[in-house]
Image: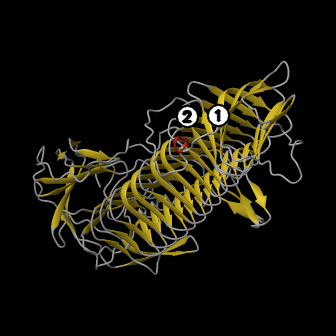
Amino acid sequence: MLVLLIVASCTKEEDSWTNTQTNTSTSTTTESNDDNSTTTNTGDDVINGVSSDGDVTSFSIAFNKNAISESLTVDGSDDDFIENTSFDKTITITFSTSGNASVSGDDAGIVSISGNDVVATNNSEQVIKYVLTGETTDGYFKLYSTKKQAIVLNGVKITNPDGAAINNQSKKRTFVVLNDGTKNYLTDGTSYADAADDEDMKGCLFSEGQLIFSGSGYLEVDANCKAGIRSDDYVRTLPKTNIYVDASSGNGIRGNEAVIVTGGVINVNVSGTADKGISTDGEARFDGGRTTIITSGGYEYDSDDSDYTACSGVKADSLITINDGELNIKSTGTGGKGLNCDKQININNGVVRIITTGTRQKDSKGSVSPKGIKADGNITFSGGQTQVRLEGTGDGTEAIESKSEIKVKAGTVECYSYDDAINSAGELTIDGGYVYARSYNNDGIDSNKNLYINSGVVIAEGSREPECGIDAAEQYKAYINGGTVIAVGGGFQAIDASSKQASIAVSVSLDTTIGVLNGSTAILGYTTPKDNSGTSLMISSPSFQNGSAYTLRTGCSIEDGTSFYNLTTGCTIGSGSQSVDVTASTSISSSMGGGGGPGGGGGPGGFGPGGW
């Protein structure tokens, strides 16, 4: 029998589509001469080395304060390693709940004490190590110094109801050492009455200079007024550190110049309106460790930007770089974001998991939408595993969005959202890796300029008509030059004839298993989505030759092989209920799927439930 495809051009204008039928055919389909053998020979396995657990819809994020196994290699040329610094003196300060704090090792009168308010002033040439121990419910440690220093937390518990627990006014490098086996607690007040008019006090643990955390002890920061940990320079954590920050009215960790996670266990809980888990005007860089950030605050109007703003797990003005380690972010507030950068985001390795559950806010004053990963500049994936799930609804609720270009070079990128799963204002290029993009109300992958798929494994699942699995803007083109590509949705995106790899396009029911064969050799198996999708299916494979016919078999079993979501390669395909031969072409015309409305086939170009 002949399978007919109704072909339509899809024009997108201001987020709406206009569909007009033409008489152009996308590919030739005829009744198959397939012998419907019980099994077929195993074809090539193009899914190998994938790091995904294969379910972006179900992973969870929660705080985990358990230590991780890490090694610390001291870089002799890096001044951020305390091992490269010699100290001239150690001063120990012991806080007390029953009297005044006490000091030992201070033969030069550097430390002054009033109750448990402790101030150290070092105007000498000595490099000093301050060891803090004991407990106070009404005190603080304040430091003035023209030299670098170390603050060693040795089982200390400081609560300052009137300001910061530790206030470092030194602009020099400060090592914060969490002594092995100790638990340390810092708590500030709900107001900062202790703040001097001519001095900054911007967080529970504040420093004018660099803050470098090391040691395998534990630090808990309870911030009630401003940031949890704040440096007017940069903040860096080294391997084996273990830090938990709970900020109810400010950012969790902020370094004006940078925040660098070289290692350690970092947990940040932020509940204030529009506050950020980790924030910097410069670069946020993750080189190792395990970082978990949960934000739950709402949104607010920003009069400077004349628009709404909301929480972000990580917010950087310049650059976000992920080289290794594990980064987990969950946002539950309206318009909340995971990674949010004014310039570029580069994910080179490591594991990134992001969940947002908030919805969009829009009124006459402005709007704010949830985003998993959002950058005004380029977003580049060069390795690692990235999983992003958006559970909220509303236009603009997108898993990955760049106001410039998106490039996938390697690694695994898995995303699920209400609006476009991946959206690029500029060109979108996939040169390798594994991509799964599922939108249940819009396009799976949407490029507002040219779209190039040159290699890799790509599964793009869009919503019902008129949305597509992959979509390029009307005045631009989509090219498939390599890779294994599955695109399913309400319509087909036209594939330019200059593409180097052939594709096939058919209409098929939802929740249908399809086997693709070249004679008796299995190429791949795929099961279409169960719901919230269309019936237009496009497949491209390195095994396809332009002008050659391939058999599509439905109602078949897919055995063995390697799977990435509902795509399986290197598999064996069992006998099926129906087969059709389809001719592959480097040119696919835009087309609306022929299914008989949401839920399956039955209309022109499709068969009823259980078949095409």
Q: Residue at x 52, y 38 (%)?
A: 264
Query: Furthest residue to the top?
Result: 98
Q: Residue at x 17, y 56 (%)?
A: 517
Q: Nearer the viewer, residue 27 or 437?
A: 437
Q: Secondary structure at mark 1?
A: strand
Q: Nearer the viewer, residue 542 or 305?
A: 305
Residue beneath disc 1? 152
Q: Residue at x 41, y 51 (%)?
A: 349
State the quadrant of the N terminus. Answer: bottom left
**Mark nearer the N terminus (1 vs 2):** 1
Amino acid, disc 2: Gly
Q: Can you tell which of label 1 and label 2 is closer to the viewer?
A: 1
Q: Is residue 315 left or right of residue 22?
A: right
Dots 1, 2 in contact, CB < 8 A: yes
Residue 342 place in picture, x, y as percent: 61, 64
Residue 98 place in picture, x, y as percent: 84, 18
State the quadrant of the C terminus. Answer: bottom left
